């Protein structure tokens, strides 16, 4: 776990990300961290402390809009 991540203040500023992680909770959604899809996700958790759901939201690129696809195809 990165100390810089652990020091991040959460919500009411009384807890840090490290406090939540120590309780087995995700520093973004504050929910109990459950299982992981694969080894990569598990490794990411050891770095950032994020649960699978928040990893998906943080690291997955949003699908392209129809206009973006058209722009790339055209020009
Ligand atoms: Zn989460």
Image (spheres, rainbow, N blue to C red):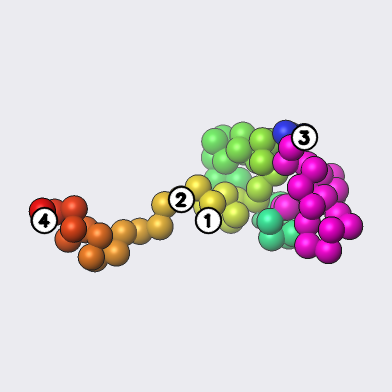
> Reading the chain from its start, which is encountered first: label 3 or label 4?
3
Whether the magenta-drawn stretch holds residue 15 is answered as: yes
> Reading the chain from its start, which is encountered first: label 1 or label 3?
3
Whether the magenta-drawn stretch holds residue 66 is answered as: no
Q: Which residue is mark 3?
A: 3
Q: Is residue 8 left or right of residue 67?
A: right
Q: Is residue 50 left or right of residue 38?
A: right
Q: Residue furthest left?
A: 75
74 or 27, nearer to the observer: 74
> Reading the chain from its start, which is encountered first: label 1 or label 4?
1
Residues under numbered marks 3 and 4 in contact, where contact means CB atoms less than 8 Å apart: no
Q: Is residue 21 left or right of residue 70?
A: right
Alpha carbon distance from label 2 to label 1: 6 Å
Q: Which residue is mark 2?
A: 60
Q: Which residue is mark 4?
A: 74
Percent coordinates x, y for residue 35 in the rendering: 65, 48
Residues under numbered marks 2 and 1 in contact, where contact means CB atoms less than 8 Å apart: yes
Alpha carbon distance from label 3 to label 2: 24 Å
Q: Residue at x 17, y 60 (%)?
A: 70
Residue 40 seen from this side: yes
Q: Is residue 22 left or right of residue 55?
A: right
Q: Residue at x 80, y 43 (%)?
A: 7
Query: Which range of residues does the magenta coloring cover?
Result: 4-27
Q: Which residue is mark 1?
A: 57
Q: Quadrant of the N terminus?
A: top right
Residues under numbered marks 1 and 4 in contact, where contact means CB atoms less than 8 Å apart: no
């Amino acid at each position: 776990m990165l100390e810089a991540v652990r020091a991040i203040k959460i919500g009411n500023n009384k807890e840090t990300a490290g406090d939540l992680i120590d309780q087995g909770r995700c520093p973004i959604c504050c929910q109990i961290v459950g299982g992981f899809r694969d080894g990569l996700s598990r490794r990411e958790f050891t770095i950032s402390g994020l649960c699978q759901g928040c990893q998906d939201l943080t690291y997955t690129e949003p699908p392209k809009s129809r206009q973006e696809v058209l722009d790339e195809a055209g020009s």
